[in-house]
Image: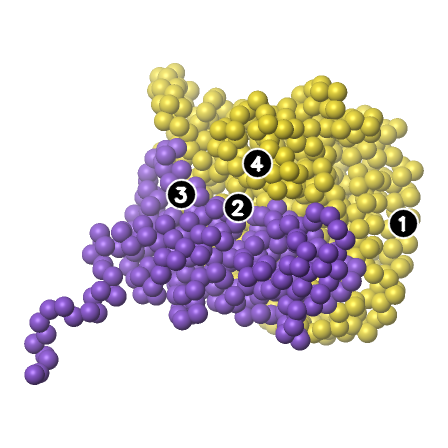
Chain colours: A purple, B yellow
Amino acid sequence: MQIHILRSETNTHQAYTLLEGETTLLHALTHIKATQDATLTFSAGCRASVCGTCAVRVNGKEVLSCAYKVQDGDVVEPLHYHPVLRDLKVDKYQATKTLTKSTAWLHRFTEASLNHKDEKRTERQTDCILCDACYSACPVYAVNPDFLGPFALTRVYRYSIDKREDDTKTLIANIQTNGVWDCTLCGECTMVCPKGIDPKMDITMLRGDSISHGYSDPNFATQNFGFDPNIKF
Amino acid sequence: MKDVLIIGSGGAGLSAALSAKASGASVLVVGKAYPTNSQTSMAQGGMNAALANVEEDHISTHITDTIKAAHGLCDEDMVRKMCADAPDTIAWLEHIGVPFSRLTSEANKRYEDNNVLQDNDTLSSELNTKNPQQSSIHTIAQRQMGGASAKRACYAQDYTGLKILHTLYDTCLKENINFLEEYYLLNLVTLDGVAKGATFLDIRTGEIKQIHAKSVIIATGGYASLYHGYTTNAYGSTGDGIAAVLRAGGAVSDMEFIQFHPTALKHSSILISESARGEGGYLINSDNKRFVDELKPRDEVARAIFEQLQKGKEVFLDLRHLGEKTLMELLPQEVALCKLHEHIDPAIELIPIKPVAHYSMGGIEVDTALEVKGIKGCFAVGECSNAKVHGANRLGGNSLLEITAFGKFVGENAYKYAIYASNKKIEERQLQQDKKEIEAIYTKENLINFYEKRLDLGKLFYEKVGILRDNAQLTQAMEEVIAMQVMQKKIGIADKSQKNNTNLIEYLEFSNALLLAPTIISAALARNESRGAHYKIGFESQDDEKFKQHIVLQWKD
């Protein structure tokens, strides 16, 4: 079987032949590098879907190389919206920066006795491995590179509903600009998450929380439905 | 110049960074990947702390269990320190927001009732009297692990390492810790046996850089991926930091003690957590018979499985009786991995398994402050270091504890050292030397493909330096490793690119593996006894008179 990998040096898809049989894409890439072409460059780590290193796009859809089974004719390309360093290896700096910008951490600890139900409220969100698949799938980045993005907002949501967080106000305040209101709720992020996380839902929830903290959707606020005394007729 | 340079950005490095920073140090964390890519993310089962949330437990019992599993090769003071620090370390992780699994309300109520009883009997655990502020950690769920006499491992489903690592990372961002990602460690920079910094290859640009610091912490992880193809470890666990310490004149110890995890998936060597057995899973052979107590320490269970395989039988992990609901609640990651890599649904089918290399107990020889023997101002923590808490066999749940508890400890120690350390920059001799060496690799002939040799080395180690060893095979393995080292002259790199050359990085990682290989074999050869993970045919018993000691190795000038 044959797969086609986008090479950065030539900006063309290079064909590689693999033996028939079931194999993960990561195994195939490792095999190609070891036996056919040592210049093929990609990132890899744990082989077990938990280190978040090996996300790429296959036939236009984000997958973890270690969890995707290769099909004949697959087209393999690097993640979107990440500067390509070489072949499938990308620079995650810009994406990682969204965690800092959105202040996705526990701001002020307060003593709270968590129970099993509380654990379940953030179980899914904390499965995130920062593979950047959602970031690559998010169409907002095509128009707004400063968007905080799905994984950072999911992480903010996860801390904001943690009973140990005593400063939800600051967390909510920090996601108003380029944040929850910039999302189009298209759900592409949810579609590609290898961990089954639903950033679209988390962002929707954060919108609700934003409103209860006194914020409103700026897309509505800019529209002038009332009388404006500055307008001269 | 930074006070503390931390090399390695897994759980140990991040814990050290946070504690050094909290002490007042300026900190730089340098790693060959992104922090959340590290091996820590793969730790599944849990982290030990005698909280007694589920049943009676005491720090003293945790100490006893750990010492027992170590088979006489640990430093009991270090074990005491680690186990005594465990509840506070859990409290610290709780404080930064780690999403631990929690007890159900019924179990919680049971605990509270018990606690009232305990108070009446003035039997309250060490915790309650010591620090009443820690009360919220009492809802953390705890599970059984092998070799533990109580349900002691705190967990977050079967993603414990992942969730601790990511919370540490979030906290590092909060504390504004400086990171340099994709910097590959080449060598430590020392002057008259004192650490002054380290040299790195900037993977993105291909440039070689020297970073100076008043103190250095090595937190680069273990060397089990030397067993390439026969390990649960990520590709990058090649012992880079340990090799750098050897080159810089430091010492290593207990290198022969490599833990084999009993249950890796048969075809992919992907880990299935010990918690699967802790939650009630059985091991059965192809005759449908159980053949070992599943909750014994890992060395004994791994050997029992290996013996079955040698008899030509297959071995399976049986989780069917736990039922789908329990499996999805407690072991969701395992279920997904089995389905993906073995086409097995553990709720209705048997999981084919084999034991593979999982953890290196040995490593950089350190003192009780975790300072490296032979290099002043250089510290080592986590799997790369031999803090002598695991001895001949590590207990499940003690490695996440070690990296966080000792990570915090070493951060403070390195800062204390840095306060009085000289901040005079030294010449860039190491930098010049490393530049030459890397250039030489580019111009070297490439007659032999090292990727093939990497596979050969992994197979050689699994077969001859594996679960059951004997001196004839060890000697053969040593000869083959020496042959490979000679062959190295003919091994170069096929990719001549300056930037983002992962071929070069993998070459350097393989070189480190080849450098460490003889230390493992020679220590295994010298240890004519069986102890913990080191089991030698012809010497099946433990010989305390001759071998209740650490084998420490250092390069001669």
Query: What's under tag 2, amino acid-wise?
Result: Leu
Task: Tell me what residue is drawn at x 78 percent, y 35 percent.
Answer: B467
Q: Foreground mark, 2 or 3?
A: 3
Q: Is residue A206 visible?
A: yes
The answer to whether the residues at label 3 and label 4 have Cβ atoms under 8 Å apart is no
Vertical side of B275 occupied by B440: above or below: below
Residues marked 3 and 1, same chain: no
Q: Position of residue B310 (x, y in %)?
A: 82, 29
Q: Which mark is residue B335?
A: 4
- Work out whether residue A183 or residue B297 is closer to the camera in this orientation and state it: A183
Q: Position of residue B308 (x, y in %)?
A: 78, 26
Query: What's under tag 3, amino acid-wise?
Result: Thr
Subunit of label 1 = B
Q: Position of residue B388 (x, y in %)?
A: 66, 39
The crowding category of the residue bearing disc 2, from other C-alpha atoms within 10 Å (few below 14, some 14 to 19, many at least 20), is: many
Subunit of label 3 = A
The residue where tag 1 is placed is: B480
Task: Tell me what residue is drawn at x 88 percent, y 47 percent.
Answer: B478
The answer to whether the residues at label 3 and label 1 have Cβ atoms under 8 Å apart is no
Q: Foreground mark, 2 or 4?
A: 4
The residue where tag 3 is placed is: A122
Vertical side of B260 occupied by B506: above or below: below
Q: Is residue B219 left or right of residue B472?
A: left
The answer to whether the residues at label 2 and label 1 have Cβ atoms under 8 Å apart is no
The residue where tag 2 is placed is: B162
